[in-house]
Image: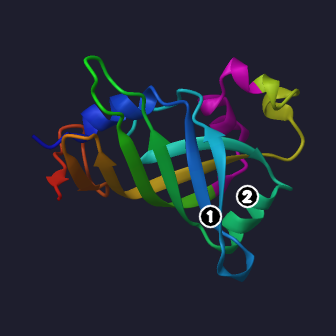
Amino acid sequence: MPKTLGELARIVKDIDFAMLSTHSDGGTIAGRPMSNNRDVDYDGDSWYFACEDTRVVRELRADPKVGLGFHGKGGMLGMKPVFIHIEGEARIIQDKAQFEAHWTPDLERWFKDGIDTPGLVLINVQGTRLHYWDGEEQGELVLTGATADTVATATS
């Protein structure tokens, strides 16, 4: 039976790192791991901190269309791992109130001055479509207007 957005949100919350794919110079695609810091009450939005002077931020300003890849561990009794891919658009946020809303203490490992780190930005990826595969089933969910109870369409 296809999964709901609520079920998929619980899976994403247990996966700390996503592979964020952006469009780079010359039409290439660049990818890098980004931590969601367990800041997931997934409704289609993902949140990542970065520094403004980085390649990822330059690429997002040039083309905000992105992909997020998640790989969850296998379950009990030999269950296969789950794979989730989210298509979306990124926004660069420079609002300290938003920083505070999404900040976790573990981030100080990378950003020594916390939300006052010079050049700190928050990347908000607003998902538009989600695909998942779990070894037993696969599905697709359009995220615009989806709620926790929205059921993915089974795909084959």
> How packed is label 2: few (under 14 Cα within 10 Å), some, or many (20 or more)?
many
What's the residue at 86%, 36% (across, down)? 117
Observer able to see residue 121: yes
Task: Tell whether label 1 touches label 2 (CB within 8 Å).
Answer: yes
Question: Does residue 97 lie above or below 60 as drawn?
Answer: above
Q: Residue flagged by tag 2: what amino acid is it?
A: Val
Q: Which mark is residue 22?
A: 1
Q: Is residue 34 above or below residue 142?
A: above
Residue 43 visible, this angle: no
Which image quarter is the N terminus in? Answer: top left
Q: Earlier in the sequence, mark 2 or mark 1?
A: 1
Q: Which mark is residue 56?
A: 2
The residue positioned 72% from the left and 38% from the top of the image is 96
The magenta region covers 92-107
Q: Quadrant of residue 35?
A: top right
Looking at the rendered structure, the kind of residue marked 1 is: Thr
Q: Nearer the viewer, residue 66 or 91?
A: 66
Q: Could you say whether the residue bearing mark 2 is in a helix, strand or loop?
A: helix
